Amino acid sequence: MYHDAHRWGLTLQTYVQLTMLDQHTRPQTSPVRLMERSIHSARYVFVENLYRSGKMPEVDYVVLSEWFDWITRNMNVSIDLIVYLRTTPETCYQRLKMRCREEEKVISLEYLDAIHHLYEEWLIKGGLFSVVAPVLVIEADHNMQKMLELFEQSRDRILTPENWKHGP
């Protein structure tokens, strides 16, 4: 997809939407379900980025948007809390390079900057798309030790359903 987003964007995002729908609608076996991303972030950030960057034709964008709208109207894909690990594109890029995953070698700082901008627009600035749940922002430009401390400080806020509707 990174090599030819125009060709593979719709295919990948259709599959992402399907897998996210599956994750959202699976029977829940514990009090809390944690997901790395949601069907909402797939649509509001990744699909939006493909379209805005000119890598997704308008017809593909409209089809994915219509599917997303139908899903959100007809299925329960609600979420209770969004935990936004707010990291600068530069830190993301450094971490990506340190991981050294073959499939990530083509990801540019410009791409990460565009993704970051869309997350900020959606979750912080309240732009084009509505925020579908309370947002807990954790500043994540820290080393692993500091991040573990921040996660521990946020544990009850994240893992206790009674705390989801209240402020941080």
Image (cartoon, helix red, strand yellow):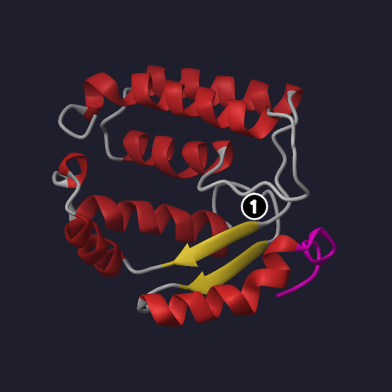
* 39 magenta-colored: no
Can you name the residue that lies furthest to the right here?
A: 162
Q: Position of residue 9 (x, y in %)?
A: 31, 26
Magenta segment: 160-168
User: Can you see residue 167?
Assistant: yes
Q: Position of residue 62 (x, y in %)?
A: 47, 21
Give the residue type that dot 1 points to: Val
Q: Position of residue 53 (x, y in %)?
A: 28, 40
Instruction: Please name the residue shown 31% across and 27% down the image.
Output: 56
Instruction: Please name the residue shown 24% across and 24% down the image.
Output: 6
Q: Position of residue 28 (x, y in %)?
A: 74, 36
Q: Which residue is mark 1?
A: 131
Instruction: Please name the residue shown 38% across and 58% down the image.
Output: 116
From the viewer's perspective, is residue 53 above or below residue 130? above
Which is the main secondary structure of the residues drawn in magenta?
A: loop
Say which quadrant the N terminus sits in.
Answer: top left
Secondary structure under the numbered disc 1 in the rendered image: loop
Can you name the residue that lies furthest to the front here?
A: 29
Q: Residue 83's quadrant in the figure? A: bottom right
Q: Residue 46's quadrant in the figure? A: top left
From the viewer's perspective, is residue 146 above or below residue 160? below
